[in-house]
Amino acid sequence: MAYRHVVGPRTHVFADLATLMAKATPVRSGDRLAGIAAESAEENAAARWCLAEVPLSEILARPLIPYEVDDVTRLILDTHDAAAFKEISHLTVGDFREFLLTATPDVLTRIAPGVTPEIAAAVSKIMRNQDLISVARKVRVVTRFRNTIGLAGTLAVRLQPNHPTDDPKGITAAILDGLILGCGDAVIGINPASDSVQALGDLLHLLDGLIRKHAIPTQACVLTHVTTTLAAMERGLPVDLVFQSVAGTEKANAGFGVTLALLKEAHEAALALKRGPLGDNCMYFETGQGSALSADAHHGIDQQTLEARAYAVARPFRPLLVNTVVGFIGPEYLYDGKEIIRAGLEDHFCGKLMGVPLGVDVCYTNHAEADQDDMDTLLTLLGAAGCTYIMGVPGADDVMLNYQSTSFHDSLYLREVLGLKRAPEFEAWLYGIGLTDAAGALLPGSGAPLLTAAPDLAA
């Protein structure tokens, strides 16, 4: 079915819904690389006007990737909540934007199971940045394992103590640095340099020992492939969260070496461990715009819509955490600071609208046309938008993955400026051991009890 929009004497024709959505997407290098982006600002504006008139029911009825050839499409349609969708089924994309801007938080929670990724992506394409922030800040997705993440007025931080050789002393030093600066309530999560089960076991024991020794109300994760984590659980290693990178098409997930069935197996294995005293949200997923295109698995669909489909992969597994590593894949997909900022706000909005606990790795690679000022801007906008969590990396410079992210100090800035708290159990722990005052402010020189533990933990 073709779509048409008239601009003065010119008629713009879009061959199908996938073409229309691609042409309506704010400019980004990945869609240009794929040859599907609008060829002019006029065509982009015409596509947005045209997309605004498309009924949501039509988007639901016209899968961008055929049901028969893609298991992510089957997952989206087979798990779609028709009752939740009924409330918005009569709306066009443009009407839906107006609906979202005036909806209450309870309404947004109620309709989330009825929002498909294509619907979320479509409405985001006709929204300004302030619209994306205004709607996302109203949505709260609360998850629990050893603490409670996503409550209103809170911002959690993943403490990311990566080391290029998985050296336990280096990792321990980074963990203690982060804890002393009040970070780590989302998760203490290590990207390992090695993918062996032996190396994974060493890191898991290190994290488990630290959490147990100090009774820290947080969770640990070693971000290795799901098959390695399954092997670790079979050996009885202390696994809190199962991690996996996921994408928005079956073919792209195959490139990651995963299937929906494999994720289900890992989820069930982690649930059986019952390691979360407060809740059973035990999965952690990472995504990023451009992953499907980089795997030649994009089916001619724009990268932002495919990113939203990745959240549909995560949603049935009730994850504790999901985050987009927004600028990590590189300038081939998000060229500069402006594109990264827009993508970060889109990803956060779409994930939250779908009921997924979205965090953002506010980041860029050193060959992108971006700098830390751009990241400060996105960080502040995401804080205003109610982002679930961000990264805490020593010095904002990951020495193992070689990219730029946000530091422990950046979270202090954001919490102070916007009046945000940590996860309540983690906040109480920091106060209880004398690291903060009753209001959550760090106390000078209060990290001595943790620092004295460093030699034992690194042994």
Image (cartoon, helix red, strand yellow):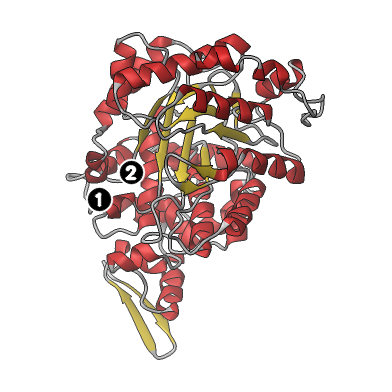
Left or right: where 46 falls relative to 447: left
Across and down, in percent, residue 424 comes to 68, 24
Q: Circle 1: is it few (<14), some (14-19), or many (20+) Cα within 10 Å?
A: some
Instruction: Identify the element where label 2 is drawn.
Output: loop
Quarter location, residue 263: top left
Taking depth in this image into account, of 448 and 282 the one nearest to the observer is 448
Q: Residue at x 59, y 42 (%)?
A: 395
Across and down, in percent, residue 331 comes to 40, 60
Instruction: Identify the element where label 1 is drawn.
Output: loop
| Quadrant placement of the N terminus | bottom left
Q: Is residue 64 visible?
A: no
Q: CA distance from mark 2 to mark 1?
A: 10 Å
Of labels 2 and 1, the one closer to you? 1
Quarter location, residue 245: top left
Q: Are marks 2 and 1 in contact (CB under 8 Å)?
A: yes
Across and down, in percent, residue 307 comes to 39, 49
Kind of residue sitting beneath label 2: Ala
> Nearer the N terminus, badge 2 or badge 1?
2
The mark found on residue 117 in the picture is none
Q: Residue furthest left?
A: 68
Left or right: where 151 falls relative to 313: right
Taking depth in this image into account, of 418 and 260 the one nearest to the observer is 418
Residue that mark 2 sits on: 247
Q: Circle 2: is it few (<14), some (14-19), or many (20+) Cα within 10 Å?
A: many
Taking depth in this image into account, of 337 and 82 the one nearest to the observer is 337
Q: Residue furthest bottom?
A: 9
Q: Is residue 151 visible?
A: yes
Residue that mark 1 sits on: 295
Kind of residue sitting beneath label 1: Ala
Q: Residue at x 59, y 9 (%)?
A: 213
Taking depth in this image into account, of 222 and 233 the one nearest to the observer is 222
